[in-house]
Amino acid sequence: MNPSRPISGAVPPTLPQNPPVNSPLFSRTTYTTREPIPLPVPVTPMNVQATHPTLPQHLCIWQQNLNTSHTAQLTLLNSSISDEWDILALQEPALNPLGNTRASTHWRVAYLTRKYTHKDKPRVVTLVNSRVSTNTWKQIPFPSRDVVVIQLETSGGRCTVFNIYNDNNHDETIEELERFLDANIQELRPAENDHMLWLGDFN
C-alpha cells in the first residue's frame, strides 16, 4: 500500500491547533481523528454566575452616618470590613464636587435613582459587596434623594432593604415611604417568607 495515497472513504483527521486541554478555563475534552469536534465553551466566572447564582444564606449589614467626613469614610473602606459585611448602608456620605461618593473595588455603589435626572446630591448611598452576585440583587426606584432601596434574593426569601435619611425639618421622606409602600407592597413582599428592613438615620 502506497502511504502517500489517501484511503478511499477515509476522513482526514481534524484537530484544533494547540487544544486547550490543560487550560483551567476549559473542560477536559477527548479529541478523536474521525470527525471535527467544536472547541469547548469557556467556563468563565460570569458564565457560572449567570447560570448558578449562589443565594446568600444570611446578610451582614453595617449602618453608619458618616457626617460627610472623608476621613471617616476612607477609614471604613480601608479596613477589613469587606471580609465580613455584605452591605454598607451609609447616611451623609462623603462626596466629591460631582456628587459622587468614595468606594473601592470591593463594593458596588447604589445611588438614589433620581441622582442624574434631578442633579440631587445624595444623603444616602448603599454599598453592596462585590462578592454578592449581581444576579441575586437589584435596585428598586424610589422618588426621593433620601432613600435607596435594594432587593436581594436569599435562601430564605426576598429581603428588601431601605436605606433612609430622615430630615428632622420635615416629614416628606416618611410620607413618601408611606405612599410607596401602599403602591408597591406586592412587589416588595409577594410571599409570606419575604422580609423588609428599614435602617438609617431617623433623627
Image: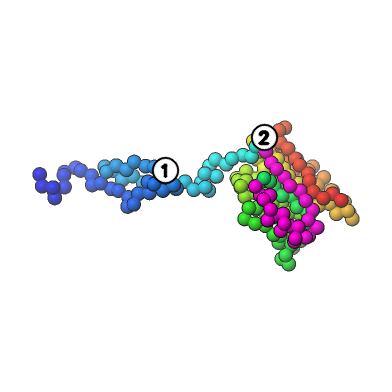
Checking the image for residue 156, the label placed there is 2
Mark 2 surroundings: few (<14), some (14-19) or many (≥20) residues within 10 A:
few
Query: Is residue 187 shown to the viewer in this render?
Result: no
Q: Residue furthest left?
A: 1
- Residue 191 painted magenta: no
What segment carries the magenta color? 58-83
Q: Residue at x 42, y 43 (%)?
A: 27
Mark 1 secondary-structure assignment: loop
- Position of 25 compared to 63: left or right? left
Residue 46: give x, y in percent of width and height: 53, 48
Q: Residue at x 32, y 43 (%)?
A: 31
Three-letter amino acid code at disc 2?
Answer: Gly
Name the one closer to the observer, 13 or 188: 13
Q: Pointer 1: what residue?
A: 27
Q: Toward which corner of the image does residue 198 lie, by quadrant? A: top right
Q: Residue at x 42, y 46 (%)?
A: 26
Name the one closer to the observer, 49 or 66: 66
